[in-house]
Amino acid sequence: MKALLVEDNATDVTLFRVALESIPASLDLSVADDGEQALEYLHGKGVYAGAARPDFILLDLNLPRKDGFEVLGELKSDPHLRLIPVIVLTSSRSPEEIARAYDLQAAAYFVKPLSGYDRVVHSILKFMDPGGMQDLPLESTGDVAILVDASGSILMANGERASGWLPGPGFVSAGAALDQALDNLRPIVRESRAEIVRGEMPTVTSDHALLVQLFEILVGNALRFCGGSRAWIEITARRWETAWVFCVRDNGIDVDLKYFDRLLHLFRHLHLRESYPGAGSGLDVCERIVERLGGRIWAETSPGASAAFFFTVPDDSGTSPSEPPPGDGAA
């Protein structure tokens, strides 16, 4: 089989390719990193003249230049391309976006895992070729792969038929989530003798388990990079426009500002990885969690000063600021 993956996140593309290597199935994968490039590929324009037509398309929704819904709409309006199955593969669990994708004749809607793509690749291939994937072994440490129908009902989990509903966000105490994360990190906190300073935490529309995991990764990374001196870590939250802005700040290692625009995707490639084993651990998962919660994440630092990670959680109106709060510029 031949597939076209339309995905602008380089980390996701890499994870997908790595997952393919772990599955004994033949899939020729091409990649387009935005909606316009995908359409050029499918129409055989420019450098894609003569490119073989894919058997199916894997389509993210959040794309530059032309988003996934626009691409899907154009494909299904084109008599030469409309019969190519399009599988949506995205972080969004929005009922509106799920229904819209199926209205535009998506063949399936898969939710991206937070970590590991082996299960979702296996499930997609099984969906496309049920007979050919039945006997493939799957040893996975990846997240659950979920296929949902137009109503949000779960049809398949990890390639097996399932029933139930895709859980939605609810009102969550960020303070309780932070308490649980710090309790999970208690041995590391005790060993580092770190001072944990925390402000008042709000109640937000979120997912408790995801918020716990997010705090645990960010605080855990800060504890690991305390630089050999007594660490302090500050966790705060403040209201800004239509969202809560959370901050995890520490007095650990300093990172050159020029790297921050690539931090979440490329942190593992910096020289810090050699000096500080584990640098960047879990940051790709943080990005997925925040994306799933409908927010955004960024980092700030200054020479010789503390480093800080910020993330937003939208209020119950479902909106989130498109720009960082004043004074907290994104890198």
Image (spheres, rainbow, N blue to C red):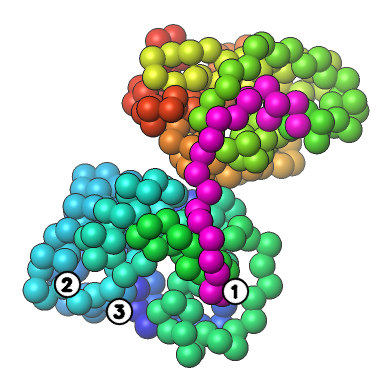
Q: Nearer the viewer, mark 2 or mark 3?
A: 2
In the rendered image, residue 128, in percent from the top left (x then y), is placed at 40, 79
Residue 316 or 92: which is nearer the viewer?
A: 316
Give the residue at x 36% y 67%.
108
Mark 1 belongs to which amino acid? Ser
Give the residue at x 11% y 75%.
80
Q: Are marks 1 and 3 in contact (CB under 8 Å)?
A: no
In the rendered image, residue 40, in percent from the top left (x then y), is placed at 16, 62
Q: Give the side of residue 155 with respect to residue 270, left or right.
A: left
Residue 318 or 273: which is nearer the viewer?
A: 318
Q: Give the side of residue 50 with respect to residue 250, left or right.
A: left
Residue 231 or 326: which is nearer the viewer?
A: 326
Q: Which badge, 1 or 3, comes first in the chain's sequence?
A: 1
Q: Are marks 1 and 2 in contact (CB under 8 Å)?
A: no
- Residue 55 badge: 3
Quadrant in which residue 306 is drawn: top right
Quarter of the figure that contains the N terminus: bottom left
Give the extent of the magenta segment.
160-180
- Residue 42 badge: none
Give the residue at x 80% y 35%.
184
Q: Give the side of residue 232 with respect to residue 310, left or right.
A: right
Of helix, strand and loop, which one carries label 2? loop
In the rendered image, residue 88, in percent from the top left (x then y), is placed at 35, 61
Q: State how far apart marks 2 and 3 are (Cα).
A: 12 Å
Mark 2 belongs to which amino acid? Arg
Of helix, strand and loop, which one carries label 3? loop
State the residue position of label 1.
22
- Residue 82 badge: 2
Q: Is residue 167 magenta?
A: yes
Q: Which badge, 2 or 3, comes first in the chain's sequence?
A: 3
